[in-house]
Image (cartoon, grey):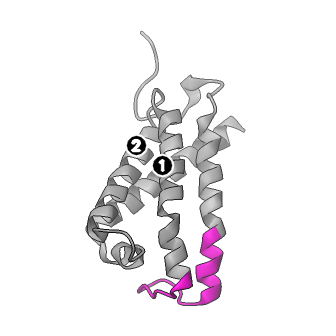
Amino acid sequence: MSKYKEILRVILAISIIVVGILHFAIPEPFVKIVPPQLPSPLELVYISGVFEILGGIGLLVPNVSRAAAWGLIALFIAVFPANINMAVNRIHLDNVPDSPVFQYIRLPLQAVLIAWAYWYTKPSSDRRNQASLINLDEK
């Protein structure tokens, strides 16, 4: 199980880093779904992008991976209102299916992301086998 857990760690980390980068490369779709009650949508998109990138990188740094996982959980909860806004107000985004079914199915997927990140809040039984950006071999 440890091998698969670490493969999934890398997949989550890379995915969240890519999404974070997209917040800077093409912020318009993200800005479009920010609830209108929130101030400075573009700045919020950039802030969430920074924390997505940091969280993804953090998942791959053993000394901070647990904190990064908790941070990603907080981030997934913080951006959930944007997903609700998109579904409730039927906000169309280019290259995203424009059906109410798809928009509402996306909502429980946020719980899957939270559960996935939560998996990495537990101490690793063998940190040497944790997917990592740094070498843990002590010399």
**Mark 2 vs 1: CB contact within 8 A:** yes
Q: Type of residue at label 1?
A: Ala
In this picture, residue 139 sits left or right of residue 43: right
| Residue 83 pos. (x, y %) | 52, 72
| Residue 9 pos. (x, y %) | 56, 45
- Picture disc at residue 48: none
The residue beneath circle 1 is 13
* Residue 106 covered by magenta stretch: yes
Q: Residue at x 51, y 49 (%)?
A: 74
SS of the residue under disc 1: helix
Against 96, residue 136 (above or below) is above
Q: Type of residue at label 2?
A: Ile
Q: Residue at x 53, y 90 (%)?
A: 98
**Quarter of the view holding residue 123:** top right
Earlier residue among tags 2 and 1: 1
The residue beneath circle 2 is 57
Against 112, residue 122 (above or below) is above
State the extent of the magenta-drawn residues as a range: 88-107
Against 28, residue 100 (above or below) is below
Q: Residue at x 61, y 88 (%)?
A: 100
Q: Is residue 131 among the parts visible in the rendering?
A: no
